[in-house]
Amino acid sequence: MLFKNHDPSKRRRKTQTATIGKLKLGNDYPVAMQSMCSTKTENIRETVAQIRRLEALNCDLVRVAVPNLEAARAIAKIKERIKIPLIADVHFDYRLALASLEHGADKIRINPGNIVPNFIFKSPGESSHITRIYLENLKAIIKKAKEKKACIRIGINSGSLEQDLWDKYGSPCPEAMVESALRWLKFFKQQDFYNLVLSVKSSRVLNAIQAYQQIAKKCDLPLHLGVTEAGPLPEGAIKSAVGLGTLLAQGIGDTIRVSLSDKPEMEIITAKEILKSLKLYTKEPDIISCPTCGRTEINLIAMVKKVKKMVKKEGITQNLTIAVMGCTVNALGEAKEADFAIAGGKKQGNIYYKGELFKGNIPEKELVKEFLTLIRSRG
Ligand code: SF4
C-alpha cells in the first residue's frame, strides 16, 4: 500500500538507527547508495583507486570481499586512504569476520545461515555438538562487533537459505527468507546486539519485493535493499529499478545496492537515477526530456546530451528540474513544473524559467549556450 501523499522522501518507514562509521542509516536519514569492489581486496592500490572513483560519484559506503586473512588485513590500509565507511563481506569462516573487525571494518555482512550451517534455531536442545560450536563462533563475531562499535548486516539470501527452511517451504520463497531473518534477528537480540541492518535478497524481483514487504511489517531494522545477481546492463538496471523502486516508493528501504555484472561505478550511477526518480536523491538536477517524434524540428537528442554534459561539467548540485522538450505540445506543462525548460520549434526554441517565458525564438545553435547562461545566473 502506498503512503497517502505518495512522496517517499516525506514518508519513510520508521526504523531503528544503524551507525556505520560516520554514517547513519534508517528513519529519515537519506537512503544511502552502496556498491561492492570488484578488485582483489588485498590489492590495496587497485581497491583504493576503485573506491575513490565511487566516492567521486557520491557513493555512501562500500563493501569489499574478505575470502582470506590477507584481505582482512588489507582493510586497515585501505581505510587510511578512503573517506567512506567500509563493509567486509564474509562467508563461512567466522575468523575472517573477527579479523575484518580487528582491522577496522565499520560493518560486516554475514549470512548467519552459512556461519552456522543447518542450525535448527527452534530446537536448540536438539542441536548437535558441532552446531553449538558454530553458534559460539557467531557469538564471538557479535562480541567483537560490540567491542569495535561496528554494525552487522544480517544478509539473508535466497541462494543460501538454511536446509530446514528448504525442507519446510520447498523453495526459497519470501516466507522462508522472512522466517530465516526473524530467527536470526531473535538470536542477535538475545545477545543484546542492535546495531543491525537486514536484507532479504532474491534474484527474482517479485520474491524480493514480497520478502521485503513482509519483513518491513515484522521488524523495525533499517533495510538494505537489493535484487541480487540482477545481471548485465540494461537488464540488471531495469530489474533493480522495478524491485527497489517499488519498495522505495512505499517508504521501504534505507540503503540500496544495485547488483550489476558491470563496473561498480555503473551500480552507483544506476542507484542514483533510481533514487532521483523518487525524489530520494537531491544532490543533482533531474533532467526531463521528450523521446522526440514526427513533430520534432530540432536535434533534440544531441541537445539533451549537451545539457547533461554541461550540468556535470558545471558541477551543478542543486535539486533542480531541467526540461528539454522537442515542441510546445507538452513543453508548456513541463516548463511550469520545471525550474528551467527548453521548448523546441522549427530550428529554434524558447527558454522558460520557473514556468515563465524567459526568452523566445532563439536559433537552435545558440539554445544550449543561452540555456546555460540562464542556469548559471539563476541556478
Ligand atoms: S514534446 Fe513534442 S516533439 Fe517531443 S515527443 Fe512530445 S510531441 Fe513530440
Image (cartoon, rainbow, N blue to C red):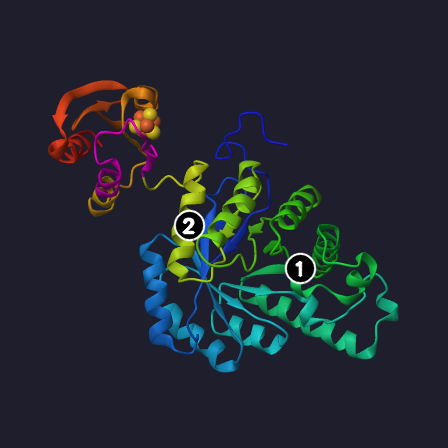
Q: Label 1 vs label 2: CA separation? A: 23 Å
**Rendering quarter of residue 282:** top left
Q: Which residues are magenta?
A: 285-306
Residue 231 left/right relative to 120: left
**Rendering quarter of residue 319:** top left
**Residue at 13 percent of width and 25 percent of height:** 362
Q: Position of residue 160 (x, y in %)?
A: 67, 65
Label located before the other in sequence (1 or 2): 1
Helix, strand or loop at label 1? It is helix
Do we see residue 220 in this rendering?
no
Look at label 2 and name its amino acid. Thr
Queried on whether the Cβ of the residue with tag 2 lies below 8 angstroms from ligand 1, the answer reads no
Helix, strand or loop at label 2? It is helix
Tally of marks? 2
Task: Based on the picture, tell me whether residue 294 belongs to the magenta stretch.
Answer: yes
Q: Residues within 10 Å of mark 2 (few under 14, many from 20)?
A: many
Q: Residues within 10 Å of mark 1 (few under 14, many from 20)?
A: many
Residue, disc 1: 158
The quarter of the picture showing ligand 1: top left
